[in-house]
Image (cartoon, rainbow, N blue to C red):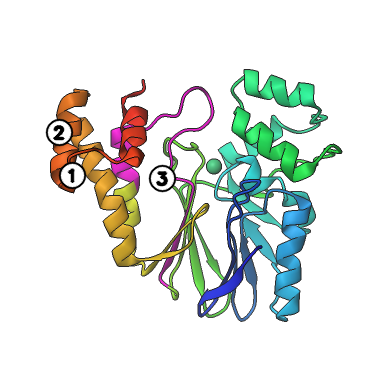
Amino acid sequence: MTQFEQISQHIWIMHAEHETDRPLLAAIVGERRTLLMDAGASPSHAAQLREELMNRSLRLPDIMMLTHWHWDHSFGLSAWNVPSIGVRETAERLRLLKGLDWSDKTLNDLVRQQIINDSSAGHIRLEYGADRNIEIREPDILFEKKLELDLGGVSCEIHHVGGDHAGDSCYLFVQEDKTLFLGDALGPSVYGGPRKYTSGEFLRLTNEAFHFDAHIYVESHSAPVGKAEFRQDIDRYVELARLVEACGKNQTNIEEGMKKFLQVQELPQEFVHALEWFLTD
Ligand SMILES: [Zn+2]
């Protein structure tokens, strides 16, 4: 069941759903305008959010922004008749997906070309069913580096940060609510070959995330967390990335260093996977 809730003065979220990999969507409601964070995976995902907003008499989105081009964040775009914001790469990536018929053959071709992966193809089949008439739209407003929005009593900053997961990844910072939306930016690359993390990129992105004066951190496929919990979780991966940098990809040394840091005998599975991604070229 989808959960919809207010997490701060101006922010309402609809939680992520794991069955079809739907990401979390958010509405930032100002006195004059409502900003939508991410379009949703499909028109039906978008409709669900619209219904939640209407049920609570909240102002519907006037404008929206995309955290990155991946299907689960952008394919709902055609369902919102409002201007959309993204970086140039978001527009370019989505342009390549326009006009496709989304048949099984097309999905298989996209997987073979490593534009998407098997898991995304499976989730698209589940989200859309057999009749996949998907209308891809590009964002209307393109920016580089940083864009600020004044919604009336609440200001938002969109920062293009890039990284391993997607070159067009953006952070959204809601100043008054001290809330940082990270999209999927801290995740590994998921398309274009095996999953991969670059230690330098991961350290840069986490550094940039810590730079904001945020009290709430929101990653698109998990629940929002407070500052202490976010730091505690991320600091362990930061340590892993630092070890990768320091040990020149010597797996045994990295594993020993990480076990010492975590004070464990056996490296937990999540770090075994993350290390594998860090060591993939
Ligand atoms: Zn993504």
The kind of residue on which mark 3 rests is Leu
| Sequence-first disc among 2 and 1 | 2
Task: Check whether the beta carbons of the residues at disc 3 and disc 2 lie within 8 A of each other.
Answer: no
Disc 2 target residue: 256
Residue 224 circle label: none
Q: Quadrant of residue 47?
A: bottom right
N-term-proximal mark, 3 vs 2 = 3
Q: Quadrant of the C terminus?
A: top left
Looking at the picture, which amino acid does disc 1 mark? Val
Q: Name the mark nearer the viewer: 1 or 3.
A: 1
Quadrant showing the N terminus: bottom right
x then y, percent, for residue 3: 62, 67
| Ligand 1 quadrant assignment | top right
List the residue tagged with mark 1. 264
Secondary element at image label 3: loop
As drawn, the label of residue 186 is 3
- The reply to whether residue 86 is visible in this rendering is yes
How many residues crowd mark 2 within 10 Å: few (<14), some (14–19), many (20+)? some
Secondary structure at badge 1 equals: loop
| Residues under numbered marks 2 and 1 in contact, where contact means CB atoms less than 8 Å apart | no
What amino acid is found at the position of numbered circle 2 in the picture? Glu
Whether residue 238 appears in magenta in the rendering, the answer is no
Q: Which residues are magenta?
A: 178-205
